[in-house]
């Protein structure tokens, strides 16, 4: 059965306080040279074999339930 | 500059109530044939060009800050 991944991130123009908090913490933990940290949501779903177009179904699920299209963008990819 | 993605998911033996809540909601929204929904965290980070091994650095960041190795697994991939 196909496994589909959805990754959701805030739109680039939207402030990402979680990403910024991580970015500020990294030098204190000894990690230099890392910037533009963005944090979002990662989903994995299994789609039944009898579903004609798994990516399309999951794209509609993402649009409906997994992401807020007003402030978030998402990508859908078939992984297996 | 390299862009690296980290995806964090609960270990498979750990209960995923968020994923289960989504899975139960899908049929009510008209989406059938979707199972084993898992929700996790998605990170994107930019690593400076002078960092020798970006994936290794980000793997250590993930181990230290982005994931809880006791209950979570993570994958690191270089995307650009």
Image (cartoon, coloured by chain):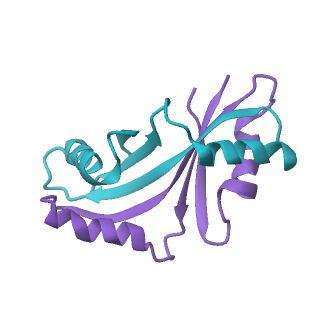
Chain colours: A purple, B cyan
Left or right of residue B45: residue A27: left
Q: Could you tell me which quadrant the C terminus of chain A lies in?
A: top right
Name the residue nearer the viewer: B80 or A22. Answer: A22
Picture coordinates of residue B13 (x, y %)?
A: 49, 29
Residue A3: which quarter of the image?
top right
Left or right of residue A31: residue A78: right
Name the residue nearer the viewer: B21 or A26. Answer: B21
Q: Residue at the spot x=43%, y=60% of the render?
A: A39
Question: Is A17 placed above or below A49 here?
Answer: below
Left or right of residue B8: residue A69: right
Name the residue nearer the viewer: A26 or A75. Answer: A26
Question: Is A15 placed above or below B71 here?
Answer: below
Q: Is residue B46 visible?
A: yes
Q: Could you tell me which quadrant the N terminus of chain A lies in?
A: top right
Q: Residue at the spot x=69%, y=47% of the render?
A: B21
Picture coordinates of residue B6 (x, y %)?
A: 38, 47
Question: Is B35 placed above or below B59 here?
Answer: above
Picture coordinates of residue A10 (x, y %)?
A: 53, 66
Residue A66: which quarter of the image?
bottom right
Q: Residue at the spot x=77%, y=34% of the render?
A: A53
Question: Is A58 placed above or below B42 here?
Answer: above
Q: Residue at the spot x=66%, y=65% of the render?
A: A68
Count of marks overlaid on the render: 0
Q: Is residue B80 visible?
A: no
Picture coordinates of residue B46 (x, y %)?
A: 30, 59
């Amino acid at each position: 059965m196909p496994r589909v991944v959805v990754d959701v991130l805030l739109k680039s123009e939207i402030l990402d306080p979680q990403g910024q908090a991580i970015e500020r913490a990294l030098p204190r933990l000894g990690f230099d040279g890392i910037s533009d940290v963005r944090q979002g949501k990662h989903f994995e779903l299994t789609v039944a074999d009898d579903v004609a177009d798994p990516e399309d179904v999951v794209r509609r699920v993402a649009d409906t339930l997994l992401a807020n299209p007003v402030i978030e963008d998402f990508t859908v990819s078939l992984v297996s």
